[in-house]
Image (cartoon, rainbow, N blue to C red):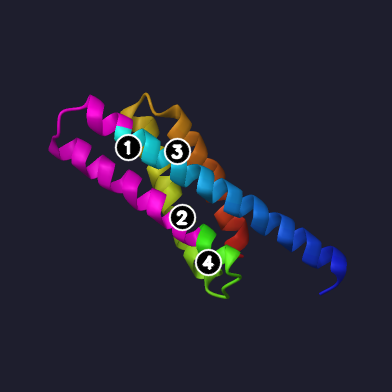
């Protein structure tokens, strides 16, 4: 791998880490706001579980990338899938545009890192 390829890969990795941590923060913030605003019911609980799963997966994927772990590719693939699902659910529920957007950015970045 030449210097240009290594630099591009480092930039992609850095972008993915940033997108992952942004998604982590946004999902946690959204979950706290949503949990306080809604009465607990089965649908809300399922959605909250998905948001928390997404947040944790984003944080973990970012951490593995920062460690330069060779396992980050597999985790990024799963992170992309979870973020995509979370984005769809946030749009379906409504009023969660910021979370949906953060999830989509992270899904795209993680999918690129998984290849």
Figure check: 27 above or below 95: below
The quadrant of the image that shows the N terminus is bottom right
State if disc 3 and disc 2 touch (CB < 8 Å): no
State if disc 1 and disc 2 touch (CB < 8 Å): no
Drawn side of residue 16 relative to residue 1, left or right: left
**Residue occupying the point 37% across, 34% down:** 30
Provide the secondary structure element on which disc 2 rests: helix
Spatial CA distance of label 4 from label 1 is: 24 Å
Drawn side of residue 24 relative to residue 31, left or right: right
Name the residue carrying label 2.
59
**Residue occupying the point 72% across, 61% down:** 10
Q: Nearer the viewer, residue 66 or 103?
A: 66
Provide the secondary structure element on which disc 3 rests: helix
Spatial CA distance of label 2 from label 3 is: 11 Å
Name the residue carrying label 4.
64
Please tell me which of labels 1 and 3 falls first in the chain.
3
Please tell me which of labels 2 and 1 falls first in the chain.
1
Spatial CA distance of label 2 from label 1 is: 15 Å
Q: Residues within 10 Å of mark 3 (few under 14, many from 20)?
A: many
Span of residues in magenta: 33-61
Name the residue carrying label 1.
31
Q: Residues within 10 Å of mark 4 (few under 14, many from 20)?
A: some
Q: Quadrant of residue 65?
A: bottom right
Reply yes or no: does residue 48 show up in magenta.
yes
Which residue, as the protein is rendered here, is positioned at the far right? 3
- Please name the predominant secondary structure of the magenta segment in the image: helix
Q: Position of residue 104 (x, y in %)?
A: 51, 42
**Residue occupying the point 32% across, 37% down:** 31
Name the residue carrying label 3.
26
Spatial CA distance of label 2 from label 4 is: 9 Å
């Amino acid at each position: 791998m030449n210097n240009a390829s290594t630099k591009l890969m480092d930039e992609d990795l850095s972008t993915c880490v940033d997108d992952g941590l942004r998604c982590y923060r946004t999902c946690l913030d959204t979950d706290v706001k949503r949990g306080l605003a809604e009465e607990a019911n089965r649908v809300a609980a399922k959605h909250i579980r998905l948001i928390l799963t997404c947040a944790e997966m984003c944080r973990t994927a970012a951490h593995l990338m920062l460690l330069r772990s060779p396992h980050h590719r597999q985790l990024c693939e799963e992170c992309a899938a979870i973020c995509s699902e979370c984005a769809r659910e946030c749009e379906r529920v409504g009023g969660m545009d910021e979370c949906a957007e953060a999830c989509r950015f992270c899904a795209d970045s993680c999918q690129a890192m998984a290849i």
